[in-house]
Amino acid sequence: MNATKITKFNGKGVYVKGNDIDTDRIIPARFLKCVTFDELGPSLFYDERFDEDGDSKGHVLDKEQHQGAEILISDTNFGCGSSREHAPQAIQKFGLKAVIADSFAEIFHGNCTTLGIPCVTMDKSAREKLVALMETDPYAEIIIDLEELKVICANNIFDINMKESARKAFLAATCDPLDNLLSATDEIARIAAKLGYA
Amino acid sequence: MGKNLYQKVWDDHVVRQLDSGQYQLFIALHLIHEVTSPQAFGMLKDKGLKVAYPGRTFATVDHIIPTDDQSRPLADDMAERMIQVLVDATRENGIEFFAPESGSQGIVHVVGPELGLTQPGMTIGCGDSHTSTHGAFGCIALGIGTSQVRDVLASQTIAMDPLKVRRILIEGELSTGVTAKDVILHIIRTLGVNGGVGFAYEYAGSVIENMSMEERMTVCNMSIEGGARCGYVNPDETTYRFLRGRERVPEGDAFDTILEKWRAYASDAAASYDDEVIFDAVDIKPTVTWGVTPGQAISIDEVIPDPDSADGLEKQLISDALDHMQLQANQPIKGTKIDVAFLGSCTNGRLSDFKQVASILKGRKVSPSVRAIAVPGSEKVDKAARELNLHLIFEEAGFEWRKPGCSMCLAMNPDKLKGDEVCASSSNRNFIGRQGSPTGRTILMSPIMVAAAAVEGKVADAREVFGLLR
Ligand code: SF4
């Protein structure tokens, strides 16, 4: 699963504006009725995108120029709320590969990292500039470079930040930690015995 | 220099540091339910892995289970399938499952503590963000994603970054009619919905010390709404008293032995913290939300904020919230008409919540314009309430007394708001669409405030409605 290391993410961007965008908005609870995550893509931001009859409300994700966007940009505390992995799964299944925001809620951030979706932070003025660039040219390619911690768009270079452990996981291709966790079975057994949980 | 509880529990459960810099943390107790966990068994199967410590995982159903007719097969096909996947997976893997009608089913965060599975000094993981509830017992209790549920099933560990610890002291004495729910809404309102990012919250001070375990659970439950990864209270005599005699707690000499172990986990007097915030109990009033995040809250006698008092995105946030809620800036929240009253959830669906409300609801009637439901948090809560005839008090007042489950907290079962109904809710999230209708409106408040709103048909001050100040 972690065989290939990916440290550059590129594609068109889409800006979903707002602070505290919660997981119920990213994927409303009724779509959590599933036994696999495979079908979640179309339900991303469903209630923001469609009215009760299923007609488009003209959400930014549905705008012609943002079709096929791969980089999601938002503001503060993105992904707050529930621990549902359905949220990053829906983002990924929709076709988005990376998220740029001012800050992230922690459980969401962790879930994204495990799935190989980098969550990078960029300060407000830089994000405003990036969003302005996208407005001028929605088709402009955005490149996120995790090695250099830079975002490049239309000849502009922006600094980004990333939680160090997450960045290391991307650089070492160990986003999914399971194999690593399983390599310590003896130590795990020792702790379990010591704490009386064996 | 001493250690705080977080550091002690962490140090005891760390297996090793990983190359990424994260730590591998042993999970003492793993709780699973039908919404975020069935998928993890599929992932396990794909990798050809087995559950490593089946005796450390316990399952129940709560999120999608209907609260009227729970007979199988459930009317909703997908809900039925999700439960069946969980039933099969737990059976195959030797995991104990608290099924409906077993007498132990209920909301996962109500079940763990009431059975005594939740014990001081544990690390607890569950695929649900309100796992923070269990911190009331002095645990590091973490909401985790489905891939991490898989990790726990496969290895009984997760990979995690260490947290900082903020001590939140609440000193003084709460005034009449001010509850644990008001305390936590006040804290979140003050520190912000992302104020706790990167932190574990340690709640302390005289207000917390004087709280019952159920009240402490209410406070810890909503830590996540303040952005904190978890929240806890140091265990004390109240904790030990609550646990003694519970089904899954050892008895006799074995209890004394485990008690010694529990005692060692409380924060040392000389422990250091990364941050400290002090609240004065006199500043805390009955608190209700006016917006679409739990931090958008005011006390019952305040007016709704004005977007013009803020700028930039904050201004936008306030005006968007007011649009959704169809509320006017600078108007009192008191008097806002409600359509639905919901009493329940892992925040306020415990016996003490129903007892407290019953004591003031007796002889009162729910306003004819209000649909009111009371949903016990577990079969044990339901049974205990029935033994005290509390359900009759609720029914006489005009509440429907339902079967246990999450119900209208997230509306994955048939309990939903319709259209733009306004709900006075004892749950923990007022996010847009949370209660099942994209245009539905949620006002979070304490159980007695929900009762007051139900009786008046509008947001009201429970202290006035029920004459609590006299
Ligand atoms: S009651 Fe609500 S918050 Fe609690 S576990 Fe159920 S859905 Fe989650």
Image (tube, coloured by chain):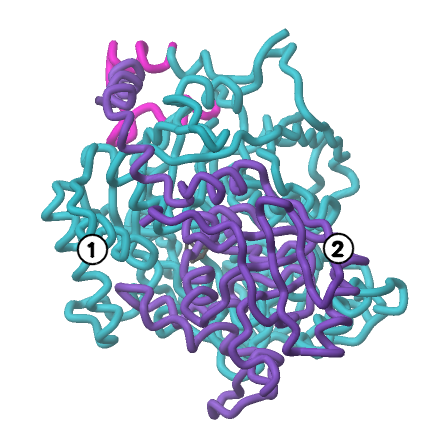
Chain colours: A purple, B cyan
**Disc 2 packing (10 Å; few <14; some 14–19; many ≥20):** many
Q: Which residue is mark 2?
A: B299
- The answer to whether residue A138 is above or below residue B152 is below
N-terminal label among 2 and 1: 1
Q: Residue at x 38, y 49 (%)?
A: A4
| Chain ID at mark 2 | B
- The answer to whether residue A89 is above or below residue B43 is below
| Chain ID at mark 1 | B
Disc 2 from disc 1: Cα separation: 42 Å
Q: Does the magenta-highlighted stretch encompass residue B405?
A: no
Q: Is residue A38 rendered to the left or right of residue B333? A: left
Identify the amino acid type marked 2. Answer: Ser
- Please, what secondary structure does the residue beneath circle 2 have? strand
Please identify the quarter of the rendering in which residue A31 is found. bottom left
Residue B221: in sight, yes or no? Answer: yes
Q: Quadrant of ligand 1?
A: bottom left
* Tag of residue B86: 1
Identify the amino acid type marked 1. Answer: Leu
Residue B450: horizontal and vertical position, in percent? 57, 61
Residue nearest the viewer, comparing A186 with B354: A186
Q: Does the magenta-highlighted stretch encompass residue B256?
A: yes
Q: What kind of secondary structure does the magenta stretch mostly adopt?
A: helix
Q: Is residue B308 rendered to the left or right of residue B450? A: right
Residue B237: horizontal and vertical position, in percent? 47, 19
Which span of residues is magenta-colored? Answer: B238-260
Residue nearest the viewer, comparing B112 with B226: B226
